[in-house]
Image: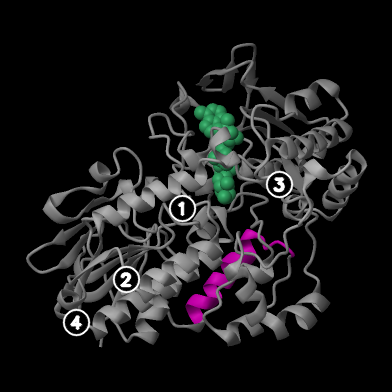
Amino acid sequence: MQKKAEPGNTQDLDAIIIGAGFAGLGMLWRLREELGMSAQVFEAGDDVGGTWYWNRYPGARCDSESYIYCLTFSKELLQDWNWSGKYPEQPEILSYINHIADRFDLRRNIQFNTRVASARFIEETNRWEVETDQGDRVTAQYLITGVGCISTSNIPEIKGRETFEGESYHTGAWPHEEVDFTGKRVGIIGTGSSGIQAIPVIAAQADSLTVFQRTPQYTIPARHGTVNRKFLEEEVKPNYEAILDKARRSKGGAPVEFSERLAVEATAEERKEAYEAGWAEGGHKFLWGSFKDIGTDRRANDTAAEFIRSKIRETVKDPETAEKLLPTDHPLGSKRALIDTDYFETYNRDNVELVDIRHSPIQEITPEGIRTEDDEHKFDMIVFATGFDAMTGTFLKMDIRGRDNLSLKEKWAEGPKTYLGLQVSGFPNMFMITGPGSPSVLSNMTISIEQHQDYIRDFIDYMRNNDVETAEADLDAESAWVDHVNKVAEPTMYMLADSWYLGANIPGKPRIFMPYAGGVGTYREKCNEIADNGYEGFILSGEVAEKVT
Ligand code: NA7
């Protein structure tokens, strides 16, 4: 029996999994329970949760609806769990993940407070050797990463940052104890998903809140509320399989019907009616439920963008503030589509000020606050809602080396190169859950995570049944996939904004569109086709491999 991991252990295992979020937990369960493998998870945090462990900032919430933001490997779990929020809030998601860890007895194979420092593929033995910051040196045939796509915080190098004498926090590394804003002068930098979720909540508590905005955002009211119990009990639970099937075949991993109408063919009145209805109902349905060409035709996109600008002008009472909040330099949906609760309304509060740092850039952080070109702002607290070194940052913090001692850092020097976002050529038996080159962040994450978990499980099962010792992406197949990912992204709106999808938020990061924009349904079909063809594009070593290659 596999012994419980203790720091400093030197086990030899079937698989090492990095990360104990949704990705790592579901993978552990599949390998252990379905394939009977020995597996060990290393997790940097002191408990399970991944993204939802770290992102505890006020207002943190998922923008997929709760009934579809879930793990589906257990039918009983699907039926038993009852969400309370329409969009699940961070504490509820974290307790859901804890419930999964307990219910399926997963903690016994997880070593917490442990960061993987390095992982090296040993060619003589075809095994991975992993070293951690706790002194573990563990070997395994498979290395599986469940490190999350947005898990390495980006704190910008602003002059004087370390001199600030008040409290400062990054949304993605929020303390476990409650942060009390009462009576505090708070400054917040960043208006991405995290910023727009946190701003209304902090504003309601703080003495004053100053928002430092670089890029104005399009955001649509979420119309969050408690979950519709009748809908959940009568429509969702009896039909979960069909709902999930639809989500798995869809573009974004949600069971929704895209509108068939074209905005460019509708009259101005018809467009207004559709947008008003979408705005009133709220959420991402504003985009997919109104017109199908918003994401593909700039003329259509402009009509939706202008509608949102009109709503901002209508909502924000001070015309000067409203003007600063208008997004004009990028199309709607070219950066992460956002939904919010009372975001624009918050700027009507007397205690909230907006600073447009495009016009008055931040010069430095001082012991007392933030100095911009035009002003000096004094704070008790600074909140960095400045995002993440997304998709590749966490991988590159570890020293991962494949064949010929090639480091992933060198391999990805010009941007991430993968086959299907699952493997990297030269790194045999290393599988990535939602790696760059897969739909991941462009989809409902749990659907994409489970697709990879199932695929990796089936692939490993195939290898075990066919005496295949190693599987690794073929270089040509990888290059073709990278080209395909670029080609699919090329005509989309995503290419028209400086976003973290393109690595544009990190100075010096190669500008490459990292996720796969072809949709989760199409992607799944491609993956399945590859599996049906004997894992085409992967080099399989071993007896059967010799026969099939
Ligand atoms: P995002 O979406 O990357 O947002 C980060 C925000 O911080 C955004 O407004 C940035 O402006 C701003 N930012 C970043 N660097 C700076 C500097 N140096 N100076 C001023 N402002 C800066 O991160 P989030 O945490 O909000 O969301 C990440 C994902 O989590 C989200 O998409 C969901 O998938 C969940 P910019 O727009 O780059 O001009």
Disc 3 versus disc 4: distance between alpha carbons? 49 Å
Give coordinates of residue 66: x percent, y percent: 67, 67
Tag 4 and tag 1, C-beta contact below 8 Å: no
For the residue pair 196 and 533, the one nearer the viewer reads as 533
Q: Can you name the residue that lies furthest to the left here?
A: 124
Give me the residue at 54% from left, 66% from top. Answer: 446
Q: Which amino acid does label 2 sit on?
A: Tyr
Q: Mark 3 points at which residue?
A: 293
Earlier sequence position, callout 2 versus callout 4? 4
Crowding at label 4, few (<14), some or many (≥20) Cα neighbours within 10 Å? Answer: some
Q: Name the residue under label 2.
A: 535
> Does the Cβ of the disc 3 residue fall within 8 Å of ligand 1?
no
Disc 3 versus disc 2: distance between alpha carbons? 35 Å
Left or right? Give the position of 504 relative to 431: right
Q: Mark 1 points at which residue?
A: 149
Give ligand 1's quarter of the image: top right
Earlier sequence position, callout 3 versus callout 4? 3
Stretch of the chain drawn in magenta: 86-102
For the residue pair 450 and 294, the one nearer the viewer reads as 294
> Does the Cβ of the disc 1 residue fall within 8 Å of ligand 1?
yes
Give me the residue at 61% from left, 65% from top. Answer: 250
Q: Which amino acid does label 1 sit on?
A: Cys
Q: Name the residue under label 4.
A: 467
Question: Residue 486 in magenta?
Answer: no
Give coordinates of residue 368: x percent, y percent: 57, 22
